[in-house]
Amino acid sequence: MSTISESALVKRINRQLRPEMMLRKTRGERLRMQVGEYHVHDFRQNLILHVHFDPEALGRELGVI
């Protein structure tokens, strides 16, 4: 079993979520304290849907790992 990098995992997840949602890495310390390292952004409603998100768990749920 091979391992994949964090950036490759995020790209695989985003291919499954697009075009309406995207897993994003949080920028800025203040926002990172509020929403965590990763969050899911909904472009249709312009909202952050899920905060403090684990990309590995989402990848397993979507079947990309």
Image: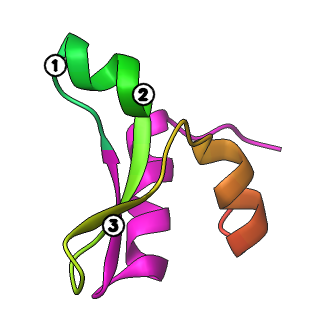
Residue 23 shown left or right of residue 56 in the figure: left
Label drawn at residue 28: 1
The quadrant holding residue 49 is: bottom left
| Residue drawn at point x = 39 percent, y = 76 percent | 15
Q: Residues within 10 Å of mark 3 (few under 14, many from 20)?
A: many
Q: Amino acid at mark 2?
A: Glu
Q: Which residues are magenta?
A: 1-24
Residue annotated with mark 2: 37
Residue annotated with mark 3: 22
Q: Is residue 12 magenta?
A: yes
Instruction: Of the two numbered discs 3 and 1 on the same chain, state the one appearing first in sequence.
Output: 3
Instruction: Note whether 4 is above or below 46 in the view shown.
Output: above
Query: Residue 35: x and y, percent?
Result: 40, 34
Query: Residue 23: x and y, percent?
Result: 38, 57
| Residue drawn at point x = 33 percent, y = 66 percent | 22
In the rendered image, the residue lying farthest to the top is 29
Instruction: Of the two numbered discs 3 and 2 on the same chain, state the one appearing first in sequence.
Output: 3
Q: Quadrant of the C terminus?
A: bottom right
Depth check, front residue: 39 or 61: 39
Q: Do the residues under discs 3 and 2 have CB atoms within 8 angstroms? A: no
Q: Amino acid at mark 3?
A: Met
Q: Residues within 10 Å of mark 1 (few under 14, many from 20)?
A: few
Instruction: Note whether 26 is above or below 39 in the view shown.
Output: above
Q: Residues within 10 Å of mark 2 (few under 14, many from 20)?
A: some
What colouring method underlies this structural image? rainbow
